[in-house]
Amino acid sequence: MHFPKYNPLINILEEEPWVELPNEDSLSSWDKSNEVVYNQMSRQREKARFFVLALDFINEINNKGDYFEFGCHRARTFRMVLTEARRHNMGFMKFLAFDSFEGLPNEGEAKNPNWKKGELTTSEEKFMKIILNHGIYTDNVFTYKGYYDNSLNNELQDKLLTIGSKIALATIDCDLYDSAVPVFEFIDPLLQPGSVIYIDDIFCGYKGNPYKSVGKAFIEHQKISQWEFVKHLNIGWWGRSYIVCDKGGKSEGII
């Protein structure tokens, strides 16, 4: 694939327009495939930057706990976390991957043409092969296969609580309302003050309305949760992170 020799980073110039911009000559062969690559470069960079900040924060406040990821397609964010955990010498952490490993269960109510049954599939075998090739904390990685309404059950929750597992960081990248509801219910007893929750796709689907889909599930959960969730960081245009705090009587919502 031909790709112009620049990247999504904003390069500063010493003259007008003060930032480097491609012109029509450099974009003359630009097509949809270039757009996809360009968007992925930009978006994954933002996610990687978030995990640099999140692991630094967790390390700084000395919040011991594990990493939980719900929605592990291609192990991209999972590898980002493993790398940053290694940079902070967090070998005590466990890294838990929760996924159907068979793609999305159904379209549900989502208004996103990319969210269809079977989309975003990475098999459990493929996921672990990627992790093993990455080579970081591989003995501390555990997979839990199944759709969340079945796999995130009381038995597993009790097992994790019994061994003292607490969440330092959780990534919720499950796209659909029906998938997000059991995730929030499952993690609530495993949270602790200072836990970081990254909710991907709050502003995806429904023309960016955060009160639908995953955002809707999050708002509903806040009404019954034992915790308060305080806005932390924005991740690109699509996601947001929250810090878990003791309940303080704040109103529920996204903002």
Image (tube, grey):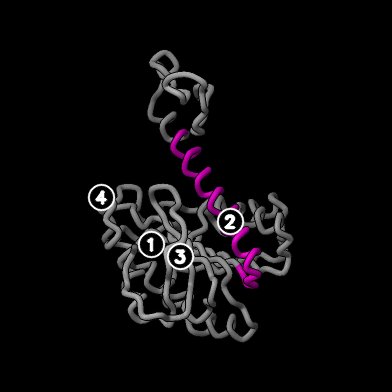
Front disc: 4 or 1: 4
- The residue indicated by pointer 3 is 242
| Sequence-first disc among 2 and 1 | 2
**x and y percent of residue 184 in the render?**
42, 73
- The residue indicated by pointer 2 is 78
Any mark on residue 47, and which?
A: none
Residue 126 in view (yes/no): no
> Over which residues does the magenta segment extend?
38-66
| Sequence-first disc among 2 and 4 | 2
Query: Relative to residue 192, is residue 91 depicted above or below?
Result: above
Q: Residues within 10 Å of mark 1 (few under 14, many from 20)?
A: some
Q: Amino acid at mark 1?
A: Pro
Quarter of the image where one finds residue 248: bottom left
Residue sitting nearer the eye, 239 or 151: 239
SS category of the residue bearing label 1? loop
Q: Is 128 on the left-hand or right-hand side of 114?
A: right
**x and y percent of residue 6 in the render?**
52, 25
SS category of the residue bearing label 3? strand
- Circles 3 and 2, Cβ within 8 Å, touching? The answer is no
Residue sitting nearer the eye, 42 or 155: 42
Residue sitting nearer the eye, 9 or 157: 9
